Image (cartoon, helix red, strand yellow):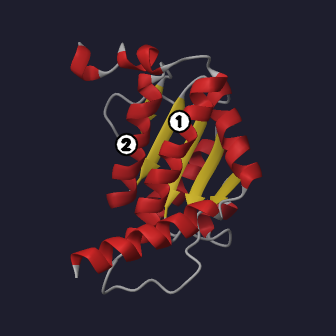
């Protein structure tokens, strides 16, 4: 069963990530590079995926905050918010998007559908849509979305590094293990 589950997840994630719109990816990279501060939010496992990406961005020297942490500063008009929600109906993510937009922040949502409350509240929608019915026998409760978003974010890292003119040694100097 483990091999079948792994094969299923890998196939589904590859199909899902490869279908993400190139223009949305490019715009997200541009917004990340130009942002003064980057705020990331997701509830539950989506939040954990966001935290993984936040670590990579910090390793590139970007000013990154996870919404809800006690040390998170106020968001502003030169900032970027990246909100992650499979359904796009998670109230805390929708409220965060509305507040950020009201303060002039550029809001990007990463969600499974461009037709939900979070997408409506965002400037840019990165749609991470699973094209077939998810089989809970092999991948329960949003596994394909979460794994797809994680790998999608990781796939952006080399492009962001190139735009910031940095290499792995630059990132390694900011890696917590080297401190």
Q: Between 175 and 15, which is closer to the camera in this rendering?
A: 15
Q: Between 140 and 172, which is closer to the camera in this rendering?
A: 172
Position above or below: 164 against 13: above
Q: Between 138 and 47, which is closer to the camera in this rendering?
A: 138
Confirm whether residue 142 shows in the render.
Answer: no
Position above or below: 96 against 169: below
Q: Nearer the viewer, mark 1 or mark 2?
A: 1
Position above or below: 144 against 54: below
**Quadrant holding the N terminus:** bottom left
What residue lies at 34% left-to-right and 28% top-to-bottom? 71
Numbered tag placed on residue 124 in the rendering: none
Numbered tag placed on residue 157 in the rendering: 1
Q: Which residue is mark 2?
A: 52
Residue 95's spot in the image, x, y percent? Answer: 52, 56
Left or right: residue 132 compared with residue 146: right
Q: Helix, strand or loop at disc 1? A: helix
């Amino acid at each position: 069963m483990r091999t079948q589950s792994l094969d299923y997840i890998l196939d589904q994630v590859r199909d899902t990530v490869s279908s993400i719109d190139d223009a949305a990816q490019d715009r997200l990279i541009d917004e990340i590079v130009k942002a003064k501060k980057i705020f990331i939010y997701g509830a539950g496992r989506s939040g954990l995926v966001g935290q993984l990406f936040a670590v990579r961005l910090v390793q590139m020297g970007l000013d990154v905050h996870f919404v809800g942490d006690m040390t998170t500063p106020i968001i502003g008009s030169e900032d970027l918010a990246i909100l992650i929600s499979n359904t796009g109906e998670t109230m805390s993510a929708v409220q965060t998007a509305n507040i950020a937009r009201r303060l002039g922040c550029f809001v990007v949502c990463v969600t499974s559908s461009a037709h939900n409350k979070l997408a409506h509240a965002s400037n840019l929608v990165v749609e991470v849509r699973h094209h077939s019915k998810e089989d809970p026998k092999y991948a329960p409760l949003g596994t394909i979305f979460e794994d797809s978003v994680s790998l999608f974010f990781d796939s952006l890292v080399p492009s962001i590094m190139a735009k910031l003119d940095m290499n792995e040694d630059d990132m390694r100097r900011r890696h917590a293990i080297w401190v």
